[in-house]
Amino acid sequence: MPNEPKSPQDLIAGPTAQSKRDDLYPDLARDGGLVNALQLAMRSLSSPLAVTGRGMARVGMNCRFSQVGNAVEERLFLCDFWDQGVMLALARTPDLLQVARSIHAWVQEKANTSQLRESFPFATCEPIAESFEKDMEVEWKWESLEESARTHRDMATLLPLILTARRTKKVRRLFPFTSLSNLCLSRCTGYPYSGDCPYAAPTGDSQYKVFDTLGKVIGRGDAESAVQLLVDHLPPNCGPATKGTADDL
């Protein structure tokens, strides 16, 4: 069974025959595309939300937004639900009016993910959703990375570093993520991440290099040494990671 897409963009392929698109989406052909059609659906609900975009549609207000695309091999709208830089849910349905209703509930009415899933059974929550809404996303992410390092061979070399980092207060309170084979840290839990913390990469034999934000090597050693280097090169007054994105810091 193929992997589920992580966002609407994943099912939007290259150009297809116009006639096929019109057969699958006569409403979009009639209304002048997805953006216009979704805006009309919003108006039919008396929703004040504005739809923007070209091809992909976007609806947002303050720190919440949703993006909508459509599949190319079947009639299917794909929608995601973001809050403060974190994608918390996905939805898949052939009904554009239901898409509009779910987005209105998310963006305008500020429904939580449980309410979203109850009202719209075609929506599914991301694994981080419950922890995010309990302000425990940092702890969840460390646990998730540790589990991945224990179960995925391509991440196994990071396990000693992750375990040591989780025992170190100044590091474990930051939001961790991986980029290629690097263990990275952020002062915010949403994307884009802060980009101002050092990061570490395995070099083999349980050794690691630590880099500054410009990619310059600032030291190397075992997990204990690498985590200490991370601590020593954190930004001044670096506190716990906060909700939001780099733009909010």
Image (cartoon, rainbow, N blue to C red):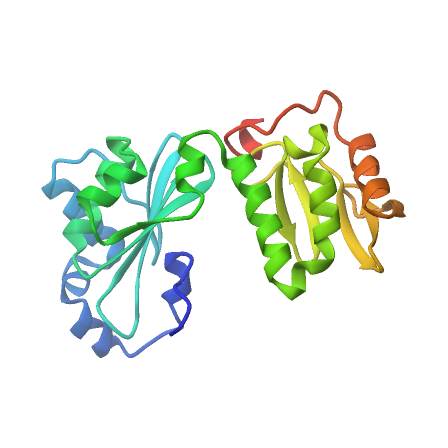
Q: Say whether residue 214 is left or right of residue 50.
A: right
Q: Say whether residue 45 is left or right of residue 59.
A: left
Quarter of the rendering occupied by the C terminus = top right
Task: Determine if residue 237 is in view.
Answer: yes
Q: Nearer the viewer, residue 248 or 110?
A: 110
Quarter of the rendering occupied by the N terminus = bottom left
Residue drawn at point x = 70 percent, y = 52 percent = 159
In the figure, residue 237 lies in which quadrant? top right
In the figure, residue 116 lies in which quadrant? top left
Q: In the rendering, at what x and y percent does residue 156 appear? A: 69, 59
Q: In the rendering, at what x and y percent does residue 58 appear? A: 34, 46
Q: In the rendering, at what x and y percent does residue 144 appear? A: 55, 48
Task: Determine if residue 83 is in view.
Answer: no
Q: Nearer the viewer, residue 149 or 61?
A: 149
Q: Which residue of the protein is positioned furthest toward the top in this rendering?
A: 237
Q: Is residue 36 depicted above or below 43 in this figure? A: below
Q: Say whether residue 116 is left or right of residue 249.
A: left
Residue drawn at point x = 22 percent, y = 77 percent = 20
Residue drawn at point x = 12 percent, y = 36 percent = 46
Q: Is residue 192 depicted above or below 33 in this figure? A: above
Q: In the rendering, at what x and y percent does residue 208 appear? A: 83, 51
Q: Is residue 92 depicted above or below 82 in this figure? A: below
Q: Is residue 237 depicted above or below 161 in this figure? A: above
